[in-house]
């Protein structure tokens, strides 16, 4: 049998294996080309006639070897214990049933193990690797990868790069490797092997025993007390305690942890090679895993579906709690999914899918492809991704996010939130008081009936209020129509200084804070000239406002007196801190405060300016028991949100959200006060500090935030950072970049805490 050489790799067949369709001997390797191949059971492009799942290997089984070579390929290995070399390009690989070995090699790949105890090796590129069911081994490569263990007792190796590792269910082992990695153990008793610079979360809730393992002699700060650990030492914090704290290393690096029950010091991590060569685990017996799984084909998954390998069913009261709250994983193919009763979660996967949540408060992740998603009854959340999607909220207060592509979003009845995101989108609020945000692209927003808020965001957008008292937030390139008929008051909101021309009337110059109110039913038309000379035509408008920024802007970024800040010596009230004091930060370890400022507002000021009133975040309102006690912050103060869902939505696991954008969630409200004292603390860079046990921001000076402090305090800051005085007001980048991405109001509303 001759060797087969492609792409720099030489392979030799294992046996005779029969003859191909043209009399050519099979070499038992299913080969792709350098182009974009779809290699599955229907693929016939192999030069020797080898096929996937045709019982044509040397042993006459479906244990296939697949060589895809270059190109952006889609590979579905199907049944058997398969070996897949994806080659170069951006590939999608699904192992299917069996104990598979998948090598992503070059390119930004999506690797999915499926059933069985699989080995998945990412290779070069920014890869997304999911083990699926079974006890799997996942290894990242040289770049920043995302590894999801999913069900089973998995082993995850991050490798080089800044990686995100999620263990999922089971007792997992997570090893970061080089780079500042993010860990989430998930459920089960996990072992996390981390280094300085990493962020560690053992997994929220439960009574499990999550272990953090570090190398060498370290100092551990937990509960305001320091502990020194040398190799062989262990600090037992108690099962289910979900403790948080900081580990300091001799080289000056550190890591932050939360939801950890035990910390161990070792000489060196016994982490194996991480090269996908260690096997897929010990295996396990069959049984329900509480996930209704499809295949990589075109599935119909509903109450009649029986194709799940473990026997899980839709609406058979067979989830872990014995209810009909189903989790459905459809995977590839053009699928049709109906979740039925219960509060369901659907992952439609790749392909042009149709998914319906039916009854209950459902969450639909539609994935790549031109998908259709319907929430039907209940308060649903529907997320598109790539492709041109059509999303229907149905009844209830729904959240719809289009993702990339030119999407159509229809809220239906209820008070809905619609976010078009990228692409030229068509947003229809329907009945109810809705919030619509177009995002990037040239969008069309129609509020429908009810008192709606429409924000075109970037692009040349068309804003139509419809019936009701609507607020239209317009900018350069937009056209605004409040809606015909009625006696309501529709408001056109514009940013900065504007010149308003009323058809058949006068010309008015507005500065931020100014309002033109022509009374109910005026239905005026005209155009506004923005500060940059752009024109915004409008019609059927009764009220015109000039604001500093569409999302508000009144207030300051700071804590309130009484907030407890974590320092190397324990927690200290923020008002007791002084310049030069050391504070624990998430990114830079222990840092000294370079400036402190305070502002006090009395009851009358707070009554006249409601936007200055503090936001109350009750204990546990941010999830995971955070904050540890009730805390008050200014409305503009940003809190850190960390979750897998955040990463799925925005491509990074940690983001900042302004407190006022969290108002309305359980335990978070803006409150009245007789007086309030706000306290700013600032460092050499924008930092994240532990306040009442939750991570939140320090003061970040810039054009807007410097405008909220007094002239004397502004001069103090500019004396410390002279470059700020040069940048502020000059349309130049702020000299102190943000520690994390900051979400907009509509983006925050897509996140569940």
Image (tube, rainbow, N blue to C red):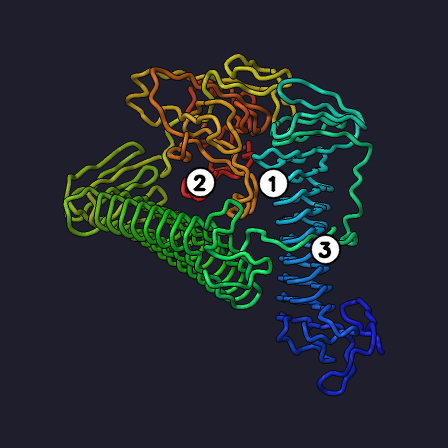
Q: How crowded is mark 3: few (under 14 residues within 10 Å), some or many (20 or more)?
A: many
Instruction: State which tag comes first along the sequence, 2 or 3.
Output: 3
Disc 2 versus disc 3: distance between alpha carbons? 36 Å
Image vertical order of residue 304 relative to residue 614, above or below: below
Residue 286 placement (x, y as % from top left): 64, 55
Residue 47 placement (x, y as % from top left): 72, 79
Of tags 2 and 3, the one toward the viewer is 3
Do callouts 2 and 3 mark residues in contact (Cβ within 8 Å)?
A: no
Toward the bottom, the furthest residue is 22
State the residue in front, 476 or 309: 309
Image vertical order of residue 571 relative to residue 174, above or below: above
Image vertical order of residue 242 relative to residue 72, above or below: above
Instruction: State which tag comes first along the sequence, 2 or 1.
Output: 1
Disc 2 versus disc 1: distance between alpha carbons? 26 Å
Location of mark 3 (residue): 119
State the residue in front, 595 or 730: 595
State the residue in front, 483 or 105: 105
Instruction: State which tag comes first along the sequence, 3 or 1.
Output: 3
């Amino acid at each position: 049998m001759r060797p087969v050489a492609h792409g720099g790799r030489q392979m030799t067949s294992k046996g005779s294996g029969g003859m191909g369709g043209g009399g050519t001997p099979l070499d038992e390797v299913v080969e792709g080309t350098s182009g974009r191949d779809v290699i599955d059971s229907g693929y016939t492009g192999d030069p020797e006639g080898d096929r996937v799942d045709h019982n044509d290997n040397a042993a006459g089984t479906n244990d296939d070897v697949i060589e895809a070579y270059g190109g952006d390929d889609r590979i579905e290995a199907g049944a058997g214990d398969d070996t897949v070399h994806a080659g170069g390009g951006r590939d999608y690989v699904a192992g299917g049933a069996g104990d598979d070995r998948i090598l992503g090699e070059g390119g930004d790949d999506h690797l999915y193990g499926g059933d069985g105890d699989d080995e998945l090796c990412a290779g070069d590129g920014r890869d997304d690797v999911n083990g699926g069911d079974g006890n799997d081994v996942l290894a990242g490569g040289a770049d920043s990868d995302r590894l999801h263990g999913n069900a089973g007792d998995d082993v995850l190796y991050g490798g080089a790069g800044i990686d995100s590792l999620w263990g999922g269910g089971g007792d997992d082992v997570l090893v970061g490797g080089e780079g500042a990695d993010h860990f989430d153990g998930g459920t089960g008793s996990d072992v996390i092997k981390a280094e300085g610079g990493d962020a560690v979360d053992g997994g929220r809730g439960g009574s499990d025993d999550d272990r953090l393992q570090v190398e060498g002699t370290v100092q551990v700060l937990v509960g305001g007390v320091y502990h020194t650990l040398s190799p062989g030492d262990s600090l037992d914090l108690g099962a289910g305690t979900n403790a948080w704290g900081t580990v300091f290393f001799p080289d000056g690096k550190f890591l932050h942890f939360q939801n950890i029950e035990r910390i161990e010091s070792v000489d060196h991590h016994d982490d194996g090679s991480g090269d996908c060569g260690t096997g897929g685990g010990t295996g396990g017996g069959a049984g329900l895993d509480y996930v209704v799984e499809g295949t990589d084909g075109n599935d119909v998954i509903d109450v009649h579906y029986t194709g799940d390998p473990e026997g899980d069913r839709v609406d058979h009261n067979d989830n872990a709690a014995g209810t009909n709250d189903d989790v459905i994983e459809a995977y590839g193919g053009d699928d049709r999914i109906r979740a039925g009763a219960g509060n369901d979660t659907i992952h439609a996967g790749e392909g042009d899918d149709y998914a319906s949540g039916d009854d209950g408060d459902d969450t639909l992740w539609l994935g790549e492809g031109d998908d259709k998603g319907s929430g039907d009854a209940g308060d649903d959340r529907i997320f598109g991704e790539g492709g041109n999607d059509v999303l229907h909220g149905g009844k209830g207060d729904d959240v719809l996010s289009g993702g990339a592509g030119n999407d159509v979003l229809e809220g239906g009845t209820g008070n809905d939130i619609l976010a078009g995101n990228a692409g030229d989108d068509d947003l229809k609020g329907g009945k109810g008081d809705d919030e619509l945000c177009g995002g990037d692209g040239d969008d069309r927003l129609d509020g429908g009936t009810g008192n709606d808020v429409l924000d075109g965001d970037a692009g040349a957008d068309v804003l139509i209020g419809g019936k009701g008292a609507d607020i239209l937030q317009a900018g350069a390139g937009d056209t605004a129509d409040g809606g015909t008929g009625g006696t309501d008051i529709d408001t056109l909101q514009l940013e900065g200084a504007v010149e308003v021309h009323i058809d058949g009337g006068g010309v008015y110059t507005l500065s931020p804070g100014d309002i033109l109110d022509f009374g109910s039913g005026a239905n005026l038309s005209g155009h506004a000239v923005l500060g940059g000379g752009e024109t915004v035509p409008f019609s059927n408008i009764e009220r015109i406002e000039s604001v500093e920024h569409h999302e508000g802007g009144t207030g300051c970024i700071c804590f309130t007196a009484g907030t407890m800040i974590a320092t190397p010596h324990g927690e200290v009230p923020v008002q007791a801190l002084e310049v030069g004091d050391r504070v624990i930060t998430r990114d830079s370890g222990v840092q000294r405060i370079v400036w402190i400022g305070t502002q006090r507002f009395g009851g009358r000021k707070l009554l006249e300016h409601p936007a200055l009133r503090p936001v109350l975040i009750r204990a546990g309102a941010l999830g995971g028991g955070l904050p540890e006690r009730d805390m008050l912050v200014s409305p503009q103060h940003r809190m850190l949100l960390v979750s897998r869902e955040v990463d799925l939505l925005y491509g990074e696991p940690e983001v900042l959200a302004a407190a006022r954008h969290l108002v309305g969630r359980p335990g978070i409200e803006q409150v009245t006060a007789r007086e309030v004292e706000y306290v700013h603390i600032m460092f050499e860079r924008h930092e994240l500090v532990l306040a009442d046990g939750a991570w939140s921001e320090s003061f970040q000076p810039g054009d807007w935030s410097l405008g909220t402090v007094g002239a004397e305090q502004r001069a103090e800051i500019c004396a410390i950072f002279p470059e700020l005085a040069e940048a502020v007001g000059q349309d130049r980048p702020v000299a102190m970049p943000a520690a994390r991405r900051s979400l907009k109001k509509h983006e925050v509303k897509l996140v569940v805490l």
